[in-house]
Amino acid sequence: MAFALAPELVDQARGGILVVDFGAQYSQLIARRVRECRVFSAIVPHDVDPDEVVRIAPGGIILSGGPASVYEDGAPSLDPRLLNLGIPVLGICYGMQSMAQALGGVVTNSGTGEFGRTEIRVHSREGLFRDLPVDTCWMSHRDAVTSAPEGFTVTAETPGAPVAAMEDPVNRRFGVQFHPEVVHTPFGTDLLKGFLFDACDLTPTWTPANVIDDQVARIREQVGDQRAMCGLSGGVDSAVAALLVHRAIGDRLTCVFVDHGMLRMNEGEQVEEAFGKHFNVPLIHVRAQDAFLSGLKGVTDPEEKRKFIGGEFIRTFDQEAAKLGNEKFLVQGTLYSDVIESGGGTNAAVIKSHHNVGGLPDDMDMALVEPLRQLFKDEVRLVGEELGLPERMVWRQPFPGPGLAIRIIGEVTAERLEILRHADFVLQEEIRLAGLYRDLWQSFAVLPAIRSVGVQGDSRTYAYPIVIRAVTSDDAMTADWARLPHDLLEKISSRIINEVPGVNRVVLDITSKPPGTIEWE
């Protein structure tokens, strides 16, 4: 089946940017950087039909990088027609090489390549490099363009790339061998802005306020005078989706918050306070802690924990949905990254098996409302701020659906949950007081179900250890352990041991990902 961009994305991409994906690990980053410049972007596959591009009518095209060589068998190919639509084109790395090859230039494999920070020398300041402080850029290539196509001017070079940048201003075609989308290219964002606003003549109109107005109108059109329900998890995605739908249809939205008892301290109350009282969203708070805890009795295998919690969540949510009875729409916090990973949104939406806790019933006779399908995670947070969602919910670090159950290594019991919840509260409080919360991808406590000997006062203790886990990351694909200040670690350790009964030892996990994972289970 030929690729077709989802209708709601076509409307936004018209006059925006299409990022043609050649398999680069940074394709989503390119799209996000464009959006940070307040221009909408959408990702399409490298074999997108040029007729589809004409139908979308973007204001510009960016050809992404990619891991392959243009000479490899089966390497992603560029349809030359994309370069002759009268639409401005910027090729990045592999995208530039594909453009050069398609237009008659020469691409050569030098056998060495350039990787990492590289000095760059600019030959011309007439185009994208105008007024930019250029000295270093970020390279990642083996092939290089050694002869630019006819009509192009070589505008920059590096020691390993005689054509580090090239421009054909008459046909508004540009190429850079380096990666302007990464922070290691200091002038990268300004170069992208030059392409967006000078070459493409676009207007920066993609803002959280405009997103809200657009989505509210779309939701009203989709839902009409019917009713909808939303399963709240306490996370930012479902919270922002719920608030957008509530702004659109008011009290015809009912939120169901299944509290499985595995949340961190006061989180259930925070959800109820924010939605039930502050925003006045009709909210059903299902306190199902006893049922979940009973079902976890004797379970130590992490996959069994996840399976039970997911199944029990579905059963509980299904019961509440049956009680409501007349809801025709189900609100879900699907993000644009989910759409991309599932093939670009070309097929009918399917309720994700791992959404929130363990998936929602796949036989529910309700149509999906997905107001975040156009947004990346960082954009969801900005929209949440614009909607007035409390800071603690907007910027909450990623939290697993099964919650504290998979941060207890062993059987989940009421006692262990209380110990871990209290220890995690101390950790989070001190991380926030130190001003580090938003610098960390995740920070949390882990309770292994083992005991060790300790001494408190004049008495021998035999109690649990608490493991502190804190990591930095951009996307959770890789992560590094956070170098927390020693005095902060000392304070956290002292408070946990003194304030949390049942704990006599605090240790620090200094494992990166890989080889470890962020969560322990």
Image (cartoon, grey):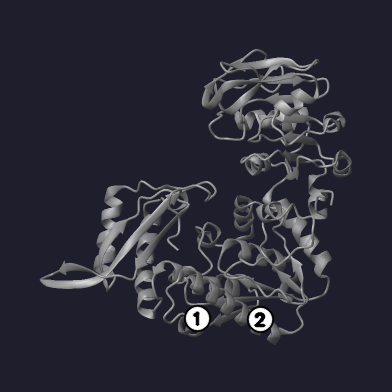
Q: As drawn, is 98 to the left or to the right of 497?
A: right
Residue 271 found in image quarter: bottom right
Q: Is residue 106 visible?
A: yes
- Report the amino acid beneath label 1: Phe
- Secondary structure beneath dot 1 equals helix
Residue 98 against residue 439 in the figure, above or below: above
Q: Residue at x 78, y 76 (%)?
A: 328
Q: On the rendered structure, is 203 left or right of 190? A: right
| CA separation in Å, label 1 and label 2 | 15 Å
Q: Which numbered disc covers residue 318? A: 2
Query: Residue 234, located in which quarter of the rendered image?
Result: bottom right
Nearest to the observer: residue 50 or residue 247: 50
Image quadrant where one finds the C terminus: bottom left
Query: In the displayed structure, would residue 458 be above or below residue 217?
Result: below
Q: Which mark is residue 84?
A: none
| Residue 389 seen by the camera | no
The one nearer the camera, 470 or 347, is 347
Q: Give the crowd class for mark 1: few <14, some 14-19, many >=20 residues within 10 Å.
A: some
Image location of residue 251, percent across then percent down: 71, 76
Q: Position of residue 99 (x, y in %)?
A: 76, 27
Q: Nearer the viewer, residue 363 or 232?
A: 363
Which residue in the structure is indicated by mark 1? 292
